[in-house]
C-alpha cells in the first residue's frame, strides 16, 4: 500500500479513536447523570468531582472566583471538569488503539475517581457509587464498539484500519442523540420536584404594612430586591430538589426534647413577616452580594424553646438537605432580632435556588453563619465540639455584619456632564440602625445625604446627594454613621476571615 494511503488510514484511525474516547465520556456522563437523578443528584459524576474540587480549593482562590466570576463560577467549574474529562477520554481512545487493554483500564480509572468523589460527599447515601459505575460501564461499551472493532493490518502493526465512514457516523449519531436524551431526562428528573409555585403560603399571624416606594433615582438598586435578582452564593453545583411531602426538620443535640416536624406541621406554627437585608461575607466594599427582602417564617427561638436548649449550648449547627453545614450563635437565634425559619420571600414561596422549602434568616449575620438554605436539621452543640463547613476553612465563627455603604450611581469611570449629578446608593448597620449617610468629594468635607424610607434596623436604607459637578476628574466616597454615632470603618480589609471593610471610592470624569 502506498505510504500516503497508509498515512491517511493511520490519521483517520487516530481521529476516530480520539472521537470515540470523547463520545464514550459523553455517553458515560449522561448515563451517570440520569441514574443520579434517581439515586441522588449530588452523585452525578461531573457534579461529584466538581464538588470535591470546591472542597479542596484554597480559600483565596474561592474568594477570587466569587469576586471575579460571580454566578458564573459554578457553570465554569462544571464545564472545566467536563472539558478535562473529555480530554482524558480522547487520550484514552488514542492509547487504546495500540493497547487494547486501555479500553478497560481507562474507563476504570475514571470510574474510580468519580466513585470516590461521590462517596466523599457530605450527603452520600448507600447508592452514591451507582452513577459512577454506570458511567464506567457505558463508557467502556461505547469505547469498545468504536475502537475494539477496528482491525490492524497484519503487515503493518500499529496501522489500524478506521471504521467504515458510514458505520462511524451512524454510531456517533446514535451515541450523541442517546447522550442528549439521557442528559435532558436526568435534568428533568432532578428538577421536577422543585415546584415552589404550587405551595400556598399561610397567612401570617403578624403582618407588616406594605413598604413605601424607595427613592426614584436612575441607577440605584431597588429598595426591595426582586427574587430573580437576589444574589446567590453557595457551594451547591446543582440546586437541591426537595419535595415538601418528604421534607423534615429535626431539632436535636443538646436539647431536652428532640423532635422532628413535617412541612404541614411547620405551616401550622405561627408565622411572622420581617424585612431583613442579607449580606454575603464574600462581598467586597461596594459589592453586589447584598439584597433586601420581606421574609415569611417561624421564629427560630419558638422552635428551640419547644426543644428546650440545655445549658452550655452556644452554637446551632444547621444542615441542608445536601449535607452542607453552617454554625450560628445560639444567642443570635434567640434574642429580639427575630431569626426565622423562612418559607416565603417577597410574598412568594422561596425560590428553589434560595432554599425552598425552608431556610434560615438571621438578621445581622453574614450568610455563611446565619442563612442555611434547604434547611433540614438544627443541632444544638458548642463551638468547641463542632465546626461547620466555613469555620473549618478558617472563617470567623460569629460573623456579624459590618456597617457599610455603597455608591450605585454614578458608576466608576463614568463620564458626566457638568451641573447637577445625583449620587445615590445604600447603607446598612444591622442590629444598630442607620443615623446618617455622608458623601465627600475629592477628600473634602463630609456632606449629609437625603435618606430614603426606614424599614427598621435590620434593613438597608437608600440615600441620595445632589452634587454640583464641575469639570475634571473627581473621587467620590461615602460612609454610614450608625445610631450609636460610630462612623463606618475606613480601615481596608478583605472579606476573609470576617467581612470586608473600608470606604468605597468611585472615580468619575466630568467633561
Image: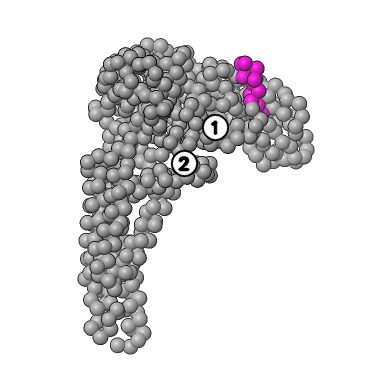
The residue sitting at 34% across, 64% down in the picture is 90
Work out which quarter of the rendered image holds the C terminus and state it: top right
Whether tag 1 and tag 2 are in contact, CB under 8 A, the answer is no
The residue sitting at 25% across, 56% down in the picture is 136
Earlier sequence position, callout 1 versus callout 2: 2
| Residue 183 in sight | no
Residue 295 vertical placement versus 502 (above, below): above
| Residue 501 in sight | yes
Q: Position of residue 244 (x, y in %)?
A: 27, 27
Find out whether residue 486 is within the magenta segment.
Answer: yes
Of marks 1 and 2, the one in the foreground = 1
Q: Mark 1 = which residue?
A: 499
Residue 61 vertical placement versus 489 (above, below): below
In the image: residue 316, left or right of residue 453: left
The residue sitting at 30% across, 51% down in the picture is 114
Point out the stretch of residues depicted in magenta. Answer: 478-488
The quarter of the picture where residue 86 lies is bottom left
- Per the model, the C-alpha gap separating discs 1 and 2 is 19 Å
Q: Secondary structure at mark 2?
A: helix
Nearest the camera: 181 or 35? Answer: 35
Q: Position of residue 146 (x, y in %)?
A: 25, 67
Residue farthest bottom in this picture: 2
Q: Position of residue 340 (x, y in %)?
A: 40, 20
Q: Mark 2 = which residue?
A: 71
Residue farthest top in this picture: 205
Amino acid at each position: 500500500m502506498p505510504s500516503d494511503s497508509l498515512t491517511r488510514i493511520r490519521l483517520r484511525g487516530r481521529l476516530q479513536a480520539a472521537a470515540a474516547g470523547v463520545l464514550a465520556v459523553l455517553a458515560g456522563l449522561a448515563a451517570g447523570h440520569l441514574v443520579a437523578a434517581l439515586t441522588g443528584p449530588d452523585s452525578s459524576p461531573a457534579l461529584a468531582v466538581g464538588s470535591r474540587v470546591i472542597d479542596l480549593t484554597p480559600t483565596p482562590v474561592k474568594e477570587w472566583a466569587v469576586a471575579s466570576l460571580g454566578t458564573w463560577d459554578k457553570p465554569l467549574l462544571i464545564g472545566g471538569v467536563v472539558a478535562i474529562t473529555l480530554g482524558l477520554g480522547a487520550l484514552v481512545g488514542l492509547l487504546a488503539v495500540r493497547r487494547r487493554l486501555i479500553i478497560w483500564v481507562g474507563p476504570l480509572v475514571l470510574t474510580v475517581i468519580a466513585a470516590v468523589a461521590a462517596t466523599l460527599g457530605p450527603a452520600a447515601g448507600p447508592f452514591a457509587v451507582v452513577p459512577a459505575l454506570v458511567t464506567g460501564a457505558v463508557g467502556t461499551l461505547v469505547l469498545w464498539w468504536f475502537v475494539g472493532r477496528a482491525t490492524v493490518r497484519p503487515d503493518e502493526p500499529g496501522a489500524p484500519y478506521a471504521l467504515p465512514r458510514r458505520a462511524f457516523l451512524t454510531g456517533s449519531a446514535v451515541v450523541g442523540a442517546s447522550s442528549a436524551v439521557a442528559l435532558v431526562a436526568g435534568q428533568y428528573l432532578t428538577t421536577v420536584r422543585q415546584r415552589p409555585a404550587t405551595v400556598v403560603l399561610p397567612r401570617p399571624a403578624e403582618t407588616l404594612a406594605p413598604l413605601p416606594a424607595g427613592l426614584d433615582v436612575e441607577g440605584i438598586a431597588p429598595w426591595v430586591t426582586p427574587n430573580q435578582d437576589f444574589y446567590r452564593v453557595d457551594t451547591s453545583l446543582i440546586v437541591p430538589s426537595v419535595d415538601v411531602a418528604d421534607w423534615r426538620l429535626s431539632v436535636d443535640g443538646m436539647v431536652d426534647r428532640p423532635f422532628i416536624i413535617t412541612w404541614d406541621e411547620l405551616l401550622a406554627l405561627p408565622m411572622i413577616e420581617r424585612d431583613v437585608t442579607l449580606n454575603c461575607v464574600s462581598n467586597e466594599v461596594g459589592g453586589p452580594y447584598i439584597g433586601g427582602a420581606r421574609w415569611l417564617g417561624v421564629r427560630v427561638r419558638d422552635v428551640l424553646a419547644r426543644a428546650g436548649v440545655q445549658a452550655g449550648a452556644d452554637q446551632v449547627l444547621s444542615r441542608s438537605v445536601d449535607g452542607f453545614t453552617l454554625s450560628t450563635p445560639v444567642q443570635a437565634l434567640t434574642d429580639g432580632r427575630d431569626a426565622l425559619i423562612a418559607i416565603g420571600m417577597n410574598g412568594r414561596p422561596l425560590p428553589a435556588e434560595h432554599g425552598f422549602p425552608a431556610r434560615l434568616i438571621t438578621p445581622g449575620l453574614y450568610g455563611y453563619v446565619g442563612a442555611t438554605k434547604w434547611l433540614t436539621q438544627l443541632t444544638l452543640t458548642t463551638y468547641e465540639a463542632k465546626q461547620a463547613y466555613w469555620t473549618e476553612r478558617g472563617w470567623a465563627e460569629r460573623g456579624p455584619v459590618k456597617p457599610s455603604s455603597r455608591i450605585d450611581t454614578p458608576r466608576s469611570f463614568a463620564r458626566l456632564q457638568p451641573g447637577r449629578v445625583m449620587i445615590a446608593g445604600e447603607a446598612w448597620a444591622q442590629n444598630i440602625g442607620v443615623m446618617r449617610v455622608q458623601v465627600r468629594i475629592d477628600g473634602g468635607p463630609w456632606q449629609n445625604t437625603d435618606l430614603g424610607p426606614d424599614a427598621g434596623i435590620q434593613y438597608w436604607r437608600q440615600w441620595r446627594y445632589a452634587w454640583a459637578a464641575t469639570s475634571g476628574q473627581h473621587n467620590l466616597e461615602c460612609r454610614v454613621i450608625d445610631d450609636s454615632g460610630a462612623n463606618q470603618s475606613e480601615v481596608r480589609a478583605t472579606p476573609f476571615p470576617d467581612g470586608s471593610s473600608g470606604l468605597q471610592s468611585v472615580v468619575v470624569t466630568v467633561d
